[in-house]
Amino acid sequence: MIYNGYKFKINNDLIIIDENKNEYDNSIELEKANLVLLEHFNENLKANSELIDENLLNTVNKKIGNASLYLNETTITNNNTEAFKFVADFTIDFWLNPSNENLTNYAAPVLTVKNDGGIWIGFLNGKFIIKKYNAPDNLMSVESPAIGEWTHIAICRKDGIIYLFYNGILQNSIADADTLVGGTLYIGTDGYNNYAKNTYIDELRILDGVAKWNTNFEVKNNEYSSEDGIVYHFDYYKIFQDTAEINTSEKKFGNGAKYFNDTGILYTSKEQENYEYELDFTIDYWIKISDENLTGIHPIMGGISTTAGPLWMHIMNGKFAVRDGEQDIVSLNPPATNEWTHIAICRKDGIIYVFYNGILQGTVSYNKAFLKGTLVIGMDIRGNYLKNSYIDELRIIDGYGRWTDNFSVPTDEYNY
């Protein structure tokens, strides 16, 4: 039974069991509820594809991942023309949620390769069409996929026969072994004045040389990896620019860590509201710094803003400092060089605590809010960088101060 937050075990006697476990469980729930950012910095096989204007992404109407691409007289392109030349077998598949407007317009292209003889996929005169660019005749003309709902569409060529599937069910096939000419890929238009209208597309894969299906199949609701050819997840990514490499040899947990050496990570400005710390917060990470950082200014992370006030951490003139953009709030001896150190900065009830490897290094009373700013790691806007250093397992929590006393450091990745 549970009473006043404690677990009790009923035997012959009434005993409180695992009181600390209750506190730990409550902390985990608070961490999850207030989590802003968790970066494992592991090597990832998923393709981030091209940098896509985040204003074209829709985070509400999506099929897989956290967003889809919204097409409404808009387009994205890919100029890797040779990648879209199909000599023999190929697979193009994607999820599509179209509107009725596409059936009433003359042409509403979904995906085209703009070159005479390139592939053309979309709506034409109320039908769903596969044809060759600028060719007078269609390769295939079938009824439209369902309007206003998600349909998995797959076009495959196997041994000279092109197959079209909706949700894994064969709709039509035709013999055509001609080379489909390469050119610029257009998504949402044919490169002229024809556009898809009020339509969503998600998880597009283009695979040359392999036909995934030529008979009915079970559709899987999962993201593809970069090993599957050219992949567009159409997901919203928090990172705008990342010049820091993943290092798979020097790591604390998982299969990689971020290596910083005159490089850095810049997150999108759209995320800066998440890094405004008005009250309690926790920021913790593993870091391995080189001796080069003990002279000069070397930012670890902070917020870029037009006004002073975002939270910053850096090593400056041989000291590790937490600052508010104007002044150092805490200044300490730096962590050991050339070895991994767990650093935690927490604020609880107006007191900021700094820990190395779970051991309290210093505290300071500081009640002011840290203003919002665009998160940056490993660099600042003044041309200062971390040197030959590694960061792993970064976690940011806003609204909860996790530690105020010495603690045992994590022994594995955070699993939430």
Image (spheres, helix red, strand yellow):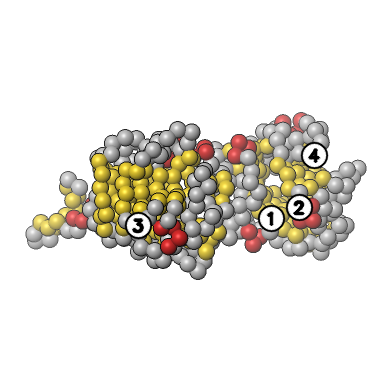
The residue carrying mark 4 is 191
Residue closest to the far bottom: 249
The percent coordinates of residue 280 (x first, y second) are 31, 41
Q: Which residue is mark 2?
A: 80
Cα–Cα gap, marks 2 and 3: 47 Å
Which of pointers 3 and 1 indicates the residue nearer the eye? 3
> Which of labels 2 and 3 is toward the front?
3
Given the image, on which type of amino acid does mark 1 rest?
Answer: Ile
| Secondary structure type for disc 2 | loop
Q: Residue 380, which numbered label?
A: none
For label 1, the crowd category at 10 Å Cα-Cα, with few meaning under 14, some 14 to 19 and many 20 or more, is many
Which residue is label 1 attached to? 230
Q: Which residue in the rendered view is the most extreme toward the left?
A: 13
Amino acid carrying mark 4 in the image: Gly
Q: CA distance from mark 4 to mark 2?
A: 15 Å
- Name the amino acid type tagged 2: Asn
Q: Of label 3 and label 1, which has the lower sequence position?
A: 1
Question: Who comes first in sequence, dot 3 or dot 4?
Answer: 4
The CA span between labels 3 and 1 is 44 Å
Q: Nearer the viewer, residue 193 or 95?
A: 193
Q: Residues within 10 Å of mark 3 (few under 14, many from 20)?
A: some
Label 4: element kind: loop
Residue contact between numbered discs 2 and 1, judged by CB atoms under 8 Å:
yes
Mark nearer the N terminus (2 vs 1): 2
Mark found first going from the N terminus, 4 or 2: 2
The residue tagged 3 is: 334
Work out which residue is located at the far right of the displayed protein and give it: 136
The kind of secondary structure element at disc 1 is strand
Find the distance from the CA under tag 1 to the CA under tag 4.
Answer: 20 Å
Measuring 28% from the left and 58% from the top, which residue is drawn there?
A: 358
Q: Secondary structure at mark 3?
A: loop
Residue type, numbered disc 3: Pro
